[in-house]
Every structure is written in structure tokens, then in C-alpha cells.
Image (cartoon, rainbow, N blue to C red):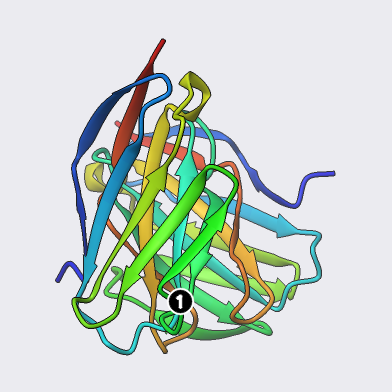
């Protein structure tokens, strides 16, 4: 059974478009995250949600908006995509301060 | 601001050798230091982790050495195998929302 899943795995789109990435975890965790991995493989936290409430919002452009409909889901919506948004986006989850489990990633390419 | 500095950027080790990756951190509020392993096309997976009240932790061929006064920690992979070839990330967890602050990663290649 997949613990943390993301859809889609690949996303290719034009500049200016709006897109969403979905994340679901079946581990019963209460905290979910979005990380961005750039072309040099650097991983950086974007958002952290605990029990559906936003607890971390790093210096991410307002074009990025996370939405947590329930504790098992954390979706990422991106408006007006830019070339610099091209990256791999990872969703992760944890039971509070315990181990974070990462999803397989979504490779976003903005043309 | 890079809160966790990792070196080397890349490492080549012969099969059976010892791989050593070093990290240094600045934020003394970090309370948990995990190492993640990432294979191409996959998400990072926890390898081993340590808390700052412990100086060493060993799990199989993997050992973390931790020096709190120097604010440094390292990963040792004993008897390195070609299957260990991956990118390794160290991280520190602060007191804000459990987010991990990652080092820039080390690409390890173990040659047969």
C-alpha cells in the first residue's frame, strides 16, 4: 500500500497557466508538508500543515496556495506559473514530530 | 540562509570502503538530525536519525557521529556497496512546525 501518494507524477505546462498537485497519505498522520527540490537537488520546505491548519509558510510567492480539505490530503495549487517554478515537488507527512515520510514527487516543467 | 552545510558534494568510494559525509549546523534550537537517502526518481527516505543528547547511533552499516559542542554530525557507511549509490541528505529540525532544514546533498557512487 502506498503511504504518501502524489498526482500527477509529471506535469508539463505553459507559463501563465494554473495547475494543482494532489497529495494523499494513508498513515493516519496529523502533519503534512510540501517541499520543493530544485535542479541542484536542494530540498526546501514550503508549507507545513498540522490538523488542517497552516503552521509554516516559508517565503513562497502568493501564487502558491496549499489547501487541506482533511487531515489525509494536502493539495498545492499554483497560479500564473513561471519558468522558475520548474522543480520536483514533494509532499510528506508525519505524526507530529516523528519521522517524515515523503511521496514519490511531482516533476513540474514550465515551458 | 543555509542552516545546514553538507560536504562533500560528491563522493566516489570503492566497494567495501567507508563512505563519510559531514554536516554542520548553525541553529542551536535544532532537536533532531535525520539522514535521508534518495534514489533517482524517488522521494527521500529516512535512513537513520539522532537526537543531540546522544553522541553516536549505529544501525547496521550506518553510523551517525554527533558533536554537539562543534555543531557537527556525520554519516559513516561501512562496507559500502554499489546499492548504496544514491544522494544523501542531512537535515536539522527546528522548533517551527517540524520542518526539516536540509543540507545540499551528497551524491555517493560506490564502484564495484
Q: Residue B37: percent from the left, percent from the top?
A: 48, 44
Which residue carries the number 1 mark? B32
- Single out the residue that lies furthest toward the right: A1
Q: Residue A82: percent from the left, percent from the top?
A: 26, 47
At 74% from the left edge and 72% from the top edge, which residue is drawn?
A29
Q: Is residue B14 left or right of residue A3?
A: left
At 71% from the left edge and 78% from the top edge, which residue is drawn?
A30
Q: Residue A58: percent from the left, percent from the top?
A: 33, 76
Q: Residue A17: percent from the left, percent from the top?
A: 39, 45
Label tally: 1
Q: Report the quarter where the N terminus of chain A lies.
A: top right
Q: Report the quarter where the C terminus of chain A lies.
A: top left
Q: Nearer the viewer, residue B91 or A83?
A: B91
Relative vertical location of residue B64 with respect to residue B43 in this rendering, above or below: below
Q: Residues within 10 Å of mark 1 (few under 14, many from 20)?
A: many
Work out whether residue B105 can be spotted: no
Mark 1 lies on a secondary structure that is: loop
Q: Nearer the viewer, residue A6 or A28?
A: A28
Work out whether residue A4 can be spotted: yes
Amino acid at each position: 500500500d502506498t503511504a504518501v501518494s502524489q498526482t500527477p507524477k509529471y506535469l508539463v505546462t505553459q507559463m501563465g497557466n494554473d495547475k494543482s498537485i494532489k497529495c494523499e497519505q494513508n498513515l493516519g498522520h496529523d502533519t503534512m508538508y510540501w517541499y520543493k527540490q530544485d535542479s541542484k537537488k536542494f530540498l526546501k520546505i514550503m508549507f507545513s500543515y498540522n490538523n488542517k491548519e497552516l503552521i509554516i509558510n516559508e517565503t513562497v510567492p502568493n501564487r502558491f496556495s496549499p489547501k487541506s480539505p482533511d487531515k489525509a490530503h494536502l493539495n498545492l495549487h499554483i497560479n500564473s506559473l513561471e519558468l522558475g517554478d520548474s522543480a520536483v515537488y514533494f509532499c510528506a507527512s508525519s505524526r507530529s514530530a516523528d519521522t517524515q515520510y515523503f511521496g514519490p514527487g511531482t516533476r513540474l516543467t514550465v515551458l | 540562509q543555509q542552516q545546514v552545510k553538507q560536504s562533500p558534494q560528491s563522493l566516489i568510494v570503492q566497494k567495501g570502503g567507508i563512505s563519510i559525509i559531514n554536516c554542520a549546523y548553525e541553529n542551536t534550537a535544532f532537536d533532531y538530525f535525520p539522514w535521508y537517502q534518495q534514489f533517482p526518481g524517488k522521494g527521500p527516505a529516512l535512513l537513520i536519525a539522532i537526537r543531540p543528547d546522544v553522541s553516536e547511533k549505529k544501525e547496521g552499516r550506518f553510523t551517525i557521529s554527533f558533536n554537539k559542542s562543534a555543531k557537527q554530525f556525520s554519516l559513516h557507511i561501512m562496507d559500502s556497496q554499489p546499492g548504496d549509490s544514491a544522494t544523501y541528505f542531512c537535515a536539522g529540525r527546528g522548533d517551527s512546525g517540524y520542518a526539516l532544514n536540509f543540507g545540499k546533498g551528497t551524491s555517493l557512487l560506490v564502484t564495484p
